[in-house]
Image: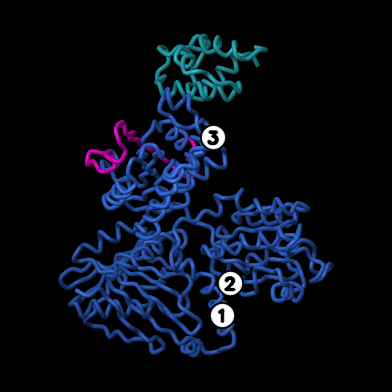
Chain colours: A blue, B cyan
Amino acid sequence: MVVNEVKGLSGEMNICLISSYTSQLIKHNLEEKSGALNINASISISEYNIVHDLISEDSLIYQAPFDFVVVLYLLDDIKQIDELVDCLRNCRAKIKGALLIANFIAPAAWSLSACNQAENEFTRFSRYQSALQQFLLTEKPANTYLLDVNSLAARLGHDQFFDPRLWYAYQIPFTRKGMAAVAQLIHRAIQCLTLPRKKCIVLDCDNTLWGGIIGEDGLEGIKLGPTYPGNCYVKFQEQLLALKNLGYILALNSKNNEPDVLEVLEHHPWQILKKHDFVSKKINWRNKIENFVDLARELNLGLDSFIFFDDNPAEVQLVRDNLPEITTIQVPKDNPVQILSLIENNYETFDILKITEEDKAKSAMYLANVAREELKKSIVNIEDYYRSLEMTMEIRKNLRVDVPRLSQMTLKTNQFNVVTIRRTEEEIISLLDQKDFLSYCFKLVDKFGDNGIVGYCEVKRGTDQAEILNFLMSCRVIGRNAENEFLTQVLRDLKSLGAETVTATWRKSPKNAICENFLENFGFTLTKSDDRQKDYRLALSARELPSLDYFQVNWRQESA
Amino acid sequence: MSLEERVLKVLRKIFPEAKADSHIDNIEGWDSVNHLRCLLGLEEEFEIMFAPEEMEKMTSVKDMILVISEKVPDS
């Protein structure tokens, strides 16, 4: 299975719902919702026991390579939590696609006595819920996520969510509204795992990060602090900080005098977001559109990666009209409490399910990038610049621990992606099981920090020749010759394994013009070309493969 | 809009060909799932609730109107 953006946008997502209750109506809701995704849902309803159906080889979930398997049940359907977790673990190992698991819905009894008993439905609920959580948090099963049906029920209210009439007559537990909400939750998860996500939250300052106008009200006059309305802005900043910790990067785009804003960031006692929390600060009197264009270039992000918060309707309109790719969120004026619901009300924009180490460290990496750019400006000779970065490249070969990041890079990298083959984690794992397949990736560390794994190359090896199937590099490290050093190292390894010739291909995609001549410039010979693809060959025997002196190179590989 | 028109409006979201004389036996695809979808749609449209017994006998547009008119005073 190859999940790629094209598939997400126009292809079909095959989903299997397995449930302990009648879920046809949820399936209908889900299919109607599809929107940008084309969802084709199948359904398997357990008449006897969902746990049994999860392990049975005959179960529908094992009959086709579904992109998503969704498991739905209620507290009362599960007799043994350990048994359920075992079955989920087992199911995870057998299916290829993502596994989405409903959590348990908290009981809402009227009875005063129930919760006063030693063992009751509440204690059972919390035991079961924490066992599920434990399974996810400690075992970290790949591509497995919980659906927080419990919060849905709590938000809607128990009586709005459950319909006893439908339950006893048709085995449908939920109201029409409840079913729509469950379908929407599933849809959100699928969308979040399929479509590219936003990366950078850009904020206005006055009446957005704090109440009032710093240029007029001054440090003491702005509303930011422990009492209303300042406490709303403190809370809003905390919400933004939480998003940053999830992997978003933050930036400012504000019409102000820069020193005024910096004074708040550095000296206001209640300011949560500090100077270093923002990767870039456009605080000036220029048009916000120009600032956005600069930000996109500086951070190497597409405009569709930005979310913009501003309280001024005219600014919001300006961005909407001129840069429609940017998601804009109007901050309500004169209603600070409403600001606190902004993120929640736009949940689809902020959903994140997959967080890699790179995501967490992203903000630090962008900051380091900005510092690198500054260093670059101060150095005239480019080789001196590379040398001053003190770069260490760690080449990692066939390491299975890297698979989540490798898959993520194949899915997200658009610019320096020579062949643009998107791969799921499962797919890479099954390739690694093949003897003739080699996976190389590299980690790049420099004096400003660790960039993490930023390049990936797949090779299929024959007796005396090898084929580069996939080659890509994150846009974060473009412009340092790392791609050339990485390719050199891969080719040296292939040569030592007996390869005499190497073939490779550049395949045109909407965004990869930047690497169109990469193979040619490296020294490959063009053997065939049309307007969509260029095929290359390189004779290794006739070629020296000198390393670039400004990279310190180490190797790590799976021991045989 | 008359009650009949409102009923048909809801039904046509599921069966575009629904008419005043439509009946569970003369519309293709009127199975138990679509039956429920129609009824839940009607509940929302008229802000009423049907008992399971009523649901079972609402198998034609005429029967639907009959049950609904008992529950909606001004229709």
Please tell me which residue lies in front, B41 or A430: B41
* Residue in the image at 61% along x and 48% along y: A345
> Mark 3 Cα within 10 Å, few/some/many (few <14, many 20+)?
few
Q: Verify CB contact (< 8 Å) between mark 1 and mark 2.
A: yes
Q: Secondary structure at mark 1?
A: helix
Q: Secondary structure at mark 2?
A: helix
Query: Mark 2, mark 3: which one is toward the viewer?
Result: 3
Q: Can residue A226 be spotted in the picture?
A: yes
Query: Residue beneath label 1, please?
Result: A373
* Relative to A444, A294 lies left or right: right
Q: How far, Cα to Cα, is label 1 from label 2? A: 9 Å
Q: How far, Cα to Cα, is label 2 from label 3? A: 58 Å
Query: Residue beneath label 2, please?
Result: A298
- In the rendering, at what x and y percent does residue B59 appear? 46, 13
Q: Which residues are magenta?
A: A32-59
Q: Amino acid at mark 2?
A: Glu
Q: Do tags 1 and 2 sit on the same chain?
A: yes
Name the chain letter of the residue that bears numbered label 2.
Answer: A
Q: Is residue A512 above or below residue A556?
A: above
Q: Which mark is residue A386?
A: none
Q: Do tags 1 and 3 sit on the same chain?
A: yes
Please tell me which residue lies in front, A370 or A287: A370
Q: Can residue A527 be spotted in the picture?
A: no
Please tell me which residue lies in front, A154 or A348: A154
- In the rendering, at what x and y percent does residue A266 appear? 70, 76
